[in-house]
């Protein structure tokens, strides 16, 4: 999907009214299905606009709900300015957080970045999961994974190397066969990769891309965080991350399981 920046008259009024004088730049970092634009203007706060095709798999309303909930818990995250849909596309306008994400925060050493990631996850996981209204336990996530698979939204060419060549249907069967018998429930980010955590002034600056936040197994986040740390910094930084989080002994089968589940999203 492409949105022409020269046709912003097609934007809903509640979105367009905030954008006068802003310069637009497409943000290519991340793997969201939405088009993401950074908006900047001299002397005015930075904004982000996400635009996604409307439909059953659009996640922008989910993200807005979760950002409002997180802010209500006193945690740093973007402020929702407007959420609209014209029937064909959905639009989410929000504030930009200061600083840089943990991939591009080049002034910080990798050791510092994995410590910030660990602290951010520890804070989120310490919330009372019984008070979180968003259910991402395996019953729900497996149903969502199957729906995405049957809709043809699982990109088999983008599987991790060890799964390339296998079909989504085969891997979904593995998800059912290997499903853990229990879940250690926390409030999980859901997509705990380094680009989704901000740093400012050498400290954690806030959570972004929160559309999959909800009650889930702790390893939903630990597994994806470990994968992201290896991808961006190398295997040698996984143990420092886990130590900073406070996980001295890990369950490799759960890490493998939740990394497999992520192939469907």
Image (cartoon, rainbow, N blue to C red):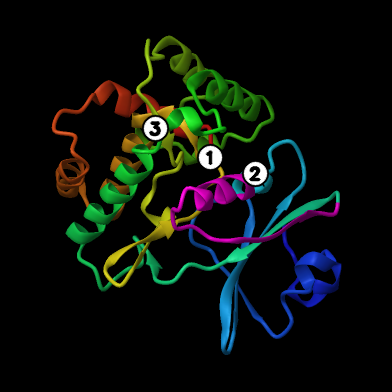
Q: Which residue carries the number 3 mark?
A: 220
Instruction: Find out whether the residues at labels 2 and 1 contact each other: C-beta distance under 8 Å.
Output: yes
Q: Are marks 2 and 3 in contact (CB under 8 Å)?
A: no
Residue nearest the viewer, comparing 130 with 120? 130
Q: Is residue 61 above or below residue 21?
A: above
> Circle 3 sits in a helix, a strand or a loop, which is it?
helix
Quarter of the image for residue 2 reads bottom right
Q: Which residue is mark 2?
A: 59
Left or right? Give the position of 16 relative to 38. right
Number of marks present in the image shown: 3
Residue situated in front as seen by the camera: 76 or 255: 76
Mark 2 or 3, nearer chain start: 2
Residue where numbered disc 1 is placed: 212
Asked if 263 appears above or below 118 in the picture, the reply is above
Magenta-highlighted residues = 64-86
Of the image marks 3 and 1, the number of the one nearer the N terminus = 1
* Residue 224: % across, % down: 36, 39
């Amino acid at each position: 999907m492409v949105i022409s920046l020269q046709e912003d008259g097609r934007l809903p009024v509640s979105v367009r009214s905030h954008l006068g004088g802003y310069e637009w730049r497409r943000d290519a970092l991340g793997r969201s299905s939405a088009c993401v634009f950074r908006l900047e203007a001299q002397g005015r706060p930075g904004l982000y606009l996400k635009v996604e095709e409307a439909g059953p798999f659009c996640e922008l309303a989910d993200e807005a709900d979760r950002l409002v909930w997180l802010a209500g818990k006193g945690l740093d995250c973007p402020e929702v300015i407007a959420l609209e849909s014209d029937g064909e596309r959905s639009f989410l306008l929000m504030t930009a957080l200061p600083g840089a994400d943990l991939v591009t925060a080049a002034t910080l050493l990798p050791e510092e970045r994995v410590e910030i990631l660990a602290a951010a996850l520890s804070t989120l996981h310490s919330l009372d999961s019984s008070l979180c209204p968003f259910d991402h336990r395996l019953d729900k996530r497996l149903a969502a994974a199957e729906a995405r698979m049957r809709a043809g939204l699982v990109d088999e060419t983008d599987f991790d190397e060890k799964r390339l060549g296998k079909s989504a249907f085969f891997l979904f069967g593995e998800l059912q066969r290997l499903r853990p018998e229990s879940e250690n429930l926390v409030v999980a980010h859901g997509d705990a990769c380094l680009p989704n955590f901000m740093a400012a002034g050498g400290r954690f600056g806030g959570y972004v891309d929160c559309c999959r936040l909800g009650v889930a197994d702790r390893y939903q986040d630990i597994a994806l965080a470990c994968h992201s740390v290896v991808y961006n910094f190398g295997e040698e930084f996984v143990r420092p991350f886990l130590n900073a989080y406070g996980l001295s002994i890990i369950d490799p089968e759960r890490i493998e399981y939740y990394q497999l589940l992520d192939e469907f999203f």
